[in-house]
Image (cartoon, helix red, strand yellow):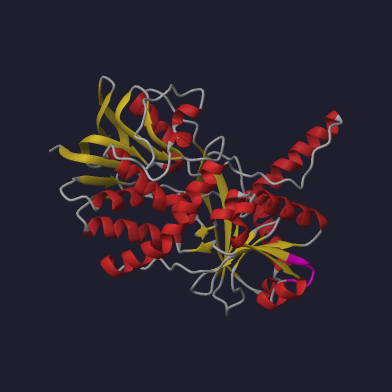
């Protein structure tokens, strides 16, 4: 028997779950969330950093990504006798800053709302994020970051060596100071995904786990549903593509054109439970380090173009461990509990792909969030709810439309930002 819904959301990671939760607040709307737990699901592999400024200015995973690319550029430049600076970070555009900061600002209220109304606690912790400085190159990197965000000066604090040691006594004496982002905090990523999902279920969303979308049903240019292997056909008025690293295939089925989303592998190390070693989250030019509410310390993360491979590899894990022990020598005496790899849904410009596509009615993108899906899930759910209902959005989604890429045709005008 076929099923009929107003909205079908393909993908039950943090983005799809947030969309389901926001849509579930509308009375009388019939919503289905369809999810297949595939190896490498980014939401459950994440560190859970709400690093709105940190990631926007290229820290967290970004600094490792940048340094890796800078090393490649330096090698190419040396071969071509061109000078390249390795101390200029990769700053994302203002549109992303606004997107990330707006989402970050939602978390205190969202945390309370999901706890009070649905009994779900995603472990929101106000930790701040410190970029630890070891040498002149790190110092130049930090100074460049600070110079790029004068409008956020009240959210940034410089710590000298003494202040850093007083604030984080276990950090290596080799560290000369830090640049701290006061509003960059953390959550439990799998608890956040579960909180959105359970709240949506309580509000009436039908959830289909272990269900693979195997095709999209169309009538001309209009998407009318999806085909699944396990549960047959789901007919709908609107399909939301929240399929993470698998989003391009779904988009091709729906529109006849792919979108440039591809998996970017990140390996993670997790320690045994420890006494409180860290007061805040730490990022260095080697790794990031976050102690979770249960005492485990999470160390990440590589940035690798390896397709859908989710294996752990000794050189990369060793590099993360060496980076972490360089920063916190005490970790040299600690056992590793487990390692894993996740697949971030990367886009060429590191910005998400949101909203409609030309020539495809009844279809919306909610994908390509790369390393900031946890952080930006809150605002993404709100934006998609507004787009579904043709209402003004709290932020302009134009910079995030698929038509910014040459392979995607122009899209019709959208409601103006409120």
The percent position of residue 22, horizontal first and vertical second, equals 30, 51
Query: Measuring 45% from the left and 48% from the top, which residue is drawn there?
Result: 39
Give the image quarter of residue 269. Answer: bottom right
Q: Position of residue 266 (x, y in %)?
A: 57, 50
**Residue 337 placement (x, y as % from top left):** 55, 68
Give left or right: position of 295 versus 332: left
Quadrant containing the C terminus is: top left
Q: Within the magenta stretch, is there residue 219? A: no
Q: Is residue 312 visible?
A: no
Report the magenta residues as a range: 172-177
Q: Farthest top residue? A: 220
Residue 242: percent from left, percent from top: 38, 42
Q: Residue at x 64, y 56 (%)?
A: 317
| Helix, strand or loop: magenta stretch | loop
Front position in the image: 239 or 95 = 95
Whether residue 101 is visible, yes or no, is yes
Question: Which one is nearer the viewer's eye here, 195 or 383?
Answer: 383
Q: Residue at x 65, y 46 (%)?
A: 65
Residue shown at 51% from the left, 23% from the top: 406
Instruction: Reply above or below: 64 against 245.
Output: below
Residue 173 colored in magenta in the image: yes
């Amino acid at each position: 028997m076929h099923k009929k819904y107003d909205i079908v959301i393909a993908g039950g990671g943090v983005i799809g779950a947030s969309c389901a939760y926001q849509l579930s607040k509308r009375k009388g709307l019939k919503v289905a969330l369809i999810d297949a737990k595939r190896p490498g699901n980014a939401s459950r592999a994440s560190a859970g950093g709400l690093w709105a400024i940190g990631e926007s200015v290229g820290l967290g995973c970004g600094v490792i990504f940048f340094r890796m690319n800078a090393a490649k550029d330096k090698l190419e430049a040396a071969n071509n006798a061109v000078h390249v600076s390795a101390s200029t970070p990769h700053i994302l555009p203002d549109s992303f800053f606004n997107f990330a900061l707006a989402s970050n600002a939602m978390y205190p209220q969202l945390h309370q709302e999901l706890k009070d109304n649905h009994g779900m606690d995603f472990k929101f912790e106000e930790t701040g994020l410190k970029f630890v400085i070891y040498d002149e190159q790190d110092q130049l990197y930090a100074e460049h970051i600070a110079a790029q965000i004068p409008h956020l000066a009240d959210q940034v604090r410089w710590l000298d060596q003494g202040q850093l040691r007083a604030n984080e006594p276990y950090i290596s004496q080799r560290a000369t100071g830090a640049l701290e982002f006061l509003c960059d905090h953390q959550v439990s990523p799998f608890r956040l995904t579960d909180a959105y999902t359970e709240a949506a279920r309580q509000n009436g969303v039908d959830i289909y786990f272990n269900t693979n979308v195997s095709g999209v049903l169309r009538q001309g240019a209009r998407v009318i549903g999806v085909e699944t292997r396990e549960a047959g056909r789901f007919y709908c008025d609107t399909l939301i593509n929240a399929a993470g690293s698998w989003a391009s295939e779904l988009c091709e089925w729906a529109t006849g054109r792919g979108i440039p989303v591809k998996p970017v592998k990140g390996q993670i190390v997790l320690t045994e439970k420890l006494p409180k070693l860290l007061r805040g989250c730490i990022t260095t030019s080697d790794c990031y380090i976050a102690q979770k509410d249960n005492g485990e310390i999470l160390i990440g993360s590589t940035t690798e173009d390896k397709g859908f491979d989710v294996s752990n590899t000794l050189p990369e894990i060793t590099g993360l461990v060496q980076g972490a022990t360089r920063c916190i020598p005490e970790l040299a005496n600690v056992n590793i509990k487990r390692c894993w790899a996740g697949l971030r849904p990367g886009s060429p410009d590191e910005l998400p792909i949101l909203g409609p596509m030309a020539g495809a009615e009844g279809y919306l993108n909610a994908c390509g969030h790369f390393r900031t899906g946890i952080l930006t899930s809150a605002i993404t759910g709100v934006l998609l709810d507004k787009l579904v209902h043709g209402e003004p959005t709290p932020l302009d989604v134009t910079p995030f439309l698929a038509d910014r890429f040459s392979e995607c045709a122009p899209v019709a005008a959208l409601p103006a930002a409120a």
